[in-house]
Amino acid sequence: MYRSLADAIRDAEAQGRSLAQIALARESEDQGRSIEDIRGSLRRALEVMRGAIGEGMTGDLHSASGLVGGDAAKLHNNAAGPLKDTPFRDILARALAVQEVNAAMGVIVAAPTAGGAGTLPAVLTGLAKAQSIPEEQLLDALATAGLIGAVIAERASLSGAEGGCQAETGAGAAMAAGAATEMLGGTPSQVGYAVALTMQGMLGLVCDPLGGLVELPCVFRNATGSAIALAGIEMALAGITFAIPADEVIDVMGEIGREMDVRYRETAGGGLAATPTGRRLAKERLYQIRRS
Amino acid sequence: MVSLLDIIGPVMVGPSSSHTAGACRLGLLGRGLVSGTPQSALLELHGSFARTGEGHGTDKALVAGLLGFRPDDERIRTALEIAEKDGLDYRFEKTTLSESVHPNTVRMTLERGDIKATLVGSSLGAGRVFVTEIDGYPVEVTGNFHTIALVAEDRKGSIARITGILAEHDINIATLRLTRKQKGGDAFMVIECDESPGDGVRDELRALNWVRWARRLDKVSGA
């Protein structure tokens, strides 16, 4: 796969193709698999993503620790709130839904990871529903998201333990933003700006899960990551650019991750996990898991 | 090389690609070493596997892999109960392996009938795994290929004979690694193949009188 988004954008523009087509062609060449076969795997991933959103919206899911669960339905069913009946709120609820299913040991697609699995499906399926996007275009969007994620994996990291939550939810948001921008008619270079505009908003994000569990704040961070992705999409589609190229924003994300103290990289030794309440809750809930 | 489907995947049971999907894959590789569901398993957890494994269902996922469940199998949630019904006697311990091993590492000691095997493997993130030791021999097994592990007498022509059998079955070798503890002692061979060797090939290898044992570790990840 590509190591640079700029190279992929240049190839797409030179060949008059979308980034999705470029990504599928490169994957086919790299792996010796037909494009139809790869699309088949993406279709399966999309089905699992939709399944998790449906399951998460039902509201009777809880993690073993009981720290999270039921909030996707609460948001979805809220009769009040300024964002009622908007795609924006629907997307936030979808992100919570997938992550609640994940915390409850349900089936999800790690995209890019399990901890950051909510943002990409929430943004893509939520916008596809709102704009009546056909299925094939959604599969293309997943291919573009995969390309962006691969570049982030090569240049920086996709692991909270290595790079903080900017590397997981941040990558998920950047992938969602770029993919959705293309799905909604953006050009390859607008996809690059969407990635840069989104990732700049996620820089420095620490990974601080209570008790080390993929629950709190992970579930909620996927929803806020979706909000930042929507900001990136909206700005890129309006023709707003960003002075620092996406590849360089990704590079700096990797650099910040490497410099981050180990307490802020999934060790539960800093951030929200190390607050007095965070420590107390983690202790109580881990005890509860042991007894269950 | 990063694959698009490594990024949009794997399809898995939550909550953690390292602690759950990767652990399940390590269990599957362990199962291959004893050619089926072990009767007893000692699972020694190191680092983050030991510290936060319980909350992440790492214990369930490891046992699920030993039972033959894949990372997207919802039975992972109830794997510990299933193991008790299926006669898999498992035991977990916390341990500290050397500082150089990855923070998410397990050492398995498995028994099935008269087969006893040990494996040290790590979960590297995003569900990727890496086995570093089998029966005390250093190895580098990724689970991205169909793998054959065998121990044979260290004698001339053994590699030619083994690769010949694979060629007869139209199996292409991706990597081959040979190690031995001393000259003339036992040689340990790990062969990663592009095609699945099947039980027939394994049995043909076992039939060579200078091969002490041969096991098949099915591919657990990759495109």
Image (cartoon, rainbow, N blue to C red):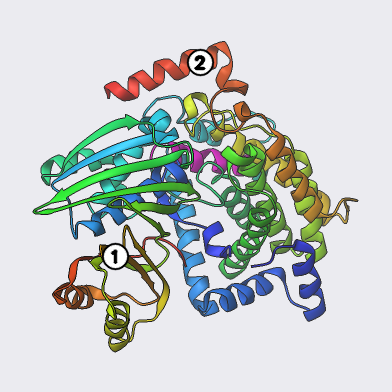
Residue A9's quadrant in the figure? bottom right
Above-or-below relation of A282 to A23: above
Name the magenta segment's main secondary structure.
Answer: helix
Residue B56's quadrant in the figure? top left
Q: What residue is shown at x 65% (from left), y 70% (from top)?
A: A23
What are the residue bounds of the magenta stretch? A89-105
- Label 2 vs label 1, nearer the camera: 1
Residue A180 point in image, percent of width and height: 69, 57
Residue B39 point in image, percent of width and height: 13, 47
Residue A150's quadrant in the figure? bottom right
Q: Dot 2 surroundings within 10 Å: few (below 14), some, or many (20 or more)?
A: some
Q: What's the mark number on residue B187?
A: 1
Residue A60 visible in the current orientation: no
Q: Quadrant of the C terminus of chain A?
A: top left
In magenta segment, residue A90: yes
* C-alpha span from label 2 to label 1: 51 Å
Residue pointed to by mark 2: A279
- Kind of residue at disc 1: Ala
Q: What's the mark number on residue B171?
A: none
Q: What residue is shown at x 27% (from left), y 69% (from top)?
A: B154
Q: Chain of mark 1?
A: B
The foreground one among A143 and B30 is: B30
Residue A45 visible in the current orientation: yes
Q: Residue furthest front?
A: B183
